[in-house]
Amino acid sequence: MKPQLLKQAEIFAFLALIFLIGVYLLLIEPEPPPIIVLSEAEQSYRFEIGKAEISADFDRALRRDIVPLLDSLSRKCKCDLIEVVGHTDGMPVRNRSNLDDLADAFNRESMEDLQAGSNMDLGMMRALSIINLLEQERQGGRLPQIRYFSPYSAGHMILLDYDLTTAEHHGQDDSTRRRIEIRLRRAPGADLHLTQTIVPTTVNTGDTITVTLTVVNDGPDATSGIQIADRLPEGLAYISHTGIGRYDTTNGLWMVGSLDRDSSKTLAIHATVADSGSVTNTAEIVSHLLPDPDSRAANGVDGEDDQASVTVIRRQQP
């Protein structure tokens, strides 16, 4: 009997160990991905001097080699943001910039009409060229993990070892310093969803109902500035409310404020049914600080989880 008990204990200990390992693997953060450096020292990744247009060879290399690498790394690290940093060398740029004169300077497919007035301009233009190509690939079905792109320019200010440049580097033509850095990140965000219940939903004129709104933050980050609009429709007369935050009975705006990850807040609105027939009450999240991955605030789109509607059926009076 004792050997049998010992065997059962060993099995239990083994299963417990497997469980703990699984929990650990779920809790640990994915390893940060490497920085991808596209140096002009390599012929495939070369811009024309003072330009930001991507050549045919550069285009092919990006689509053939870099896009699959970004796809693989973004899945592995669960990243949804690509940052692109443009670096130049110490050669001065002596043109007059027209980036500020064009309203769509940072929202166009081609950089051909843009003119850099500094190395900082040139680095930004090159970063945007790379992002435009990556966005085309995403729209074509590649890079499905990516939701956001951010362009940056370091100009000629940062050396290969990440020290700041000095006067001795000014005017140097150095292809190794002319480079594009691509970094994968997880963008800050908060997945908010809103639910609504009404009790009761089948009523007589003069009955009192309770509208309960609950907003939940599924993370991954805490967020603030949350506001929810629920202006009671005609046929429901406001009596009172209870809950966290401030509810403005004039415009129906519930100022929720901040919400930590994996937490929720609730508002209960008490109202009187004014007449017969049916009425639908709709509430929607109209403002919050961090982006929501699956909905957009205040767009009025049915089916998004930041909007909730419930219909109250009023019995016809005899």
Image (cartoon, grey):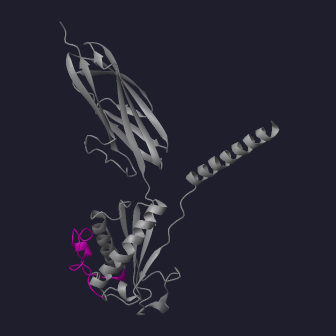
Residue occupying the point 43% across, 58% down: 187
**Where residue 221 sits in the image (x, y, percent)?**
47, 50
Residue occupying the point 39% across, 84% down: 88
Image check: 39 left or right of 102? Answer: right
Q: Main secondary structure of the magenta part?
A: loop
Q: Which residues are magenta?
A: 94-119
**Where residue 124 sits in the image (x, y, percent)?**
34, 75
- Residue most extreme to the right: 2
Q: Is residue 152 visible?
A: no
Instruction: Indicate whether 41 appears above or below 311.
Output: below
Residue occupying the point 39% across, 71% down: 68
Instruction: Indicate whether 42 appears above or below 72.
Output: below
Quarter-of-image position of residue 136: bottom left
Choose between 167 and 276: the one closer to the eye.
276
- Is residue 113 in the magenta section? yes
Image check: 11 left or right of 66? Answer: right
Quarter-of-image position of residue 8: top right
Choose between 91 and 9: the one closer to the eye.
9
Quadrant placement of the C terminus: top left
**Where residue 314 sits in the image (x, y, percent)?**
23, 17
- Is residue 309 in the magenta section? no
**Where residue 53 sits in the image (x, y, percent)?**
27, 81
Choose between 174 and 39: the one closer to the eye.
39
Quadrant placement of the N terminus: top right
- Residue most extreme to the top: 318
Instruction: Indicate whether 297 appears above or below 203.
Output: below
Image check: 198 left or right of 186? Answer: left
Q: Is residue 138 visible?
A: yes
